[in-house]
Image (cartoon, rainbow, N blue to C red):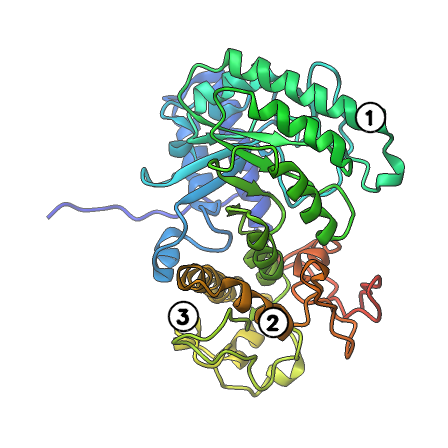
Amino acid sequence: MSEHKLQTVAFDARFPNVNQTKNCWQNYYDYSKCVAAKGEDYAPCKQFFTAYNTLCPNEWPHLVPEVAAELGELPKFTRVQIEDFLEDDMPACTKFRGGLGAFVALEETDALVLDTLDPVVAFRSAKATNKAMGIDSGGGIKRLTPEAFANIVDLLLPDIAIPPADYIEEPLPSLTQGKRISKSVSRSKKWLDEFLARKKSCTAIFAPVVGSHSTELRQVCAQGLSECDGISGYSFNDVCLQVPFSEKLDLFRHSILHLDASKPRYMQGASAPDSVVRAILYGVDLFDSSYAYAVTEQGFASLYRFGGGKEGNSGPSSDENPISGRLDMFESRMFGDFSPLADGCCCYTCRNHHRSYVHHLLKTKEMLATVLLQIHNLHCYQQLFVDIRSSIEAGTFAADARLFLERYGCFAPEIDLPAATNTSIHAFDELDILSKQTFSPTTKIQRKRHVEPQNNNDYAES
């Protein structure tokens, strides 16, 4: 029998007991510098590699692959944004043999999507020039040209790439003049042409659709993309545009009227359950999955369900707020509650643990709290899409979508559904709340818990 030596990461005096997130990043940064200076075979580089590979999370935040496997068949798409790697002008991962999938330890069956920007971040300081996209990175503001991104794509070999575009960072339409939007459209098309001319790999390309709040310029952009060869799909990133989601859907509708209907459409930043349901009614095909992470980061347990099913019934649970699909596990009433997080849920957390235990873990800032919550919240989020697909196949999605939005008090004027009037709390607003907070329970740093907003525009902190 062969002997295996089990060994943990060596002690680092810079990170004695806490802040292992910084420990993970520092070892990754040290490894990148070491490889650039000495090469992959240099022994100290391998030590940095072992350390960051052990400490850093894998595909799903808070979950290692063995725990994620408990959730069953998770989506086989993993999204990576290049702004997270641009600590130098050319990311260290471009020097890694085997492509980006191997660099981040993805399974070979997983599809990798490479974008430029994180869709959860709404505000940035870097601005575009005529030649390059501005990116805020750990190494300061970087300039990413279409040619440089094409080289990165050829080196990293993702399955899908979303080229640079001139996204307008001014959040309010009143701050954005027509000339600025027109320049954004023409500049983005120019960058796309330069990228396609330079790219050599067979990576599928999802072209960014821009145009801000101008329906006329969105039409111009869409018509230009419809005449462009080498495009496999379309990406819509209006995260920075601070208008109601119903208006974003209307802008989306104006764009797709002039695009190839046979190609998939990916809407970024629309991962909340109500946004997903409303966007599907408009023809969106792909979404990111950051919502489950946002729920977990705030100590919430998901309770929502799309229609009936084997787990639970079609309505909210008895102790659930009439328009909320979540349960705040920080609340003191969880102290002696030994029931599962959600009645009828069959996830690992609900089968083996109860609300009181998760409440205890959160109050003591144990990392296991977010592990258990992430398992449950991802299970609920995954089941949402399973139920949606079943509803579409049965031909009842429009009716089921309306019932779902009504049940949780969602505001959907595009289908004549006003918001619930008995409370001011937004349904599925965890992404908005998270953007106003800093730390996670896993950091073991005291954070200010939010209180429920007193009105639609007030997110107070206690």
Q: Residue at x 74, y 41 (%)?
A: 240
Label number found at residue 326: 2
Label number found at residue 180: 1
Nearest to N terminus: mark 2 or mark 1: 1
Estimate the spatial distance between the alpha carbons at disc 3 and disc 2, rounded to whole Å.
16 Å
Estimate the spatial distance between the alpha carbons at disc 2 and disc 1, rounded to whole Å.
41 Å
Mark 3 sits on what residue?
347
Query: As shown in the figure, which amino acid type bears the numbered disc 3?
Result: Cys
- When the figure is inspected, residue 234 is found, relative to residue 249, above or below; the finding is above
Label 1 sits on a secondary structure element that is helix
Label 3 sits on a secondary structure element that is loop
Label 3: few (<14), some or many (≥20) within 10 Å? many
Residue 247 can be seen in this image:
yes
Residue closest to the eye, 238 or 251: 251
Query: As shown in the figure, which amino acid type bears the numbered disc 1?
Result: Arg
Nearest to N terminus: mark 3 or mark 2: 2
Q: Residue at x 80, y 63 (%)?
A: 459
For residue 399, side relative to residue 462 (left or right)? left
Query: As shown in the figure, which amino acid type bears the numbered disc 2?
Result: Arg
Residue closest to the eye, 28 or 387: 387
Estimate the spatial distance between the alpha carbons at disc 3 and disc 1, rounded to whole Å.
49 Å
Q: Residue at x 52, y 33 (%)?
A: 260
Label 2 sits on a secondary structure element that is strand
- When the figure is inspected, residue 67 is found, relative to residue 177, above or below; the finding is below
Q: Are marks 2 and 1 in contact (CB under 8 Å)?
A: no
Label 2: few (<14), some or many (≥20) within 10 Å? many
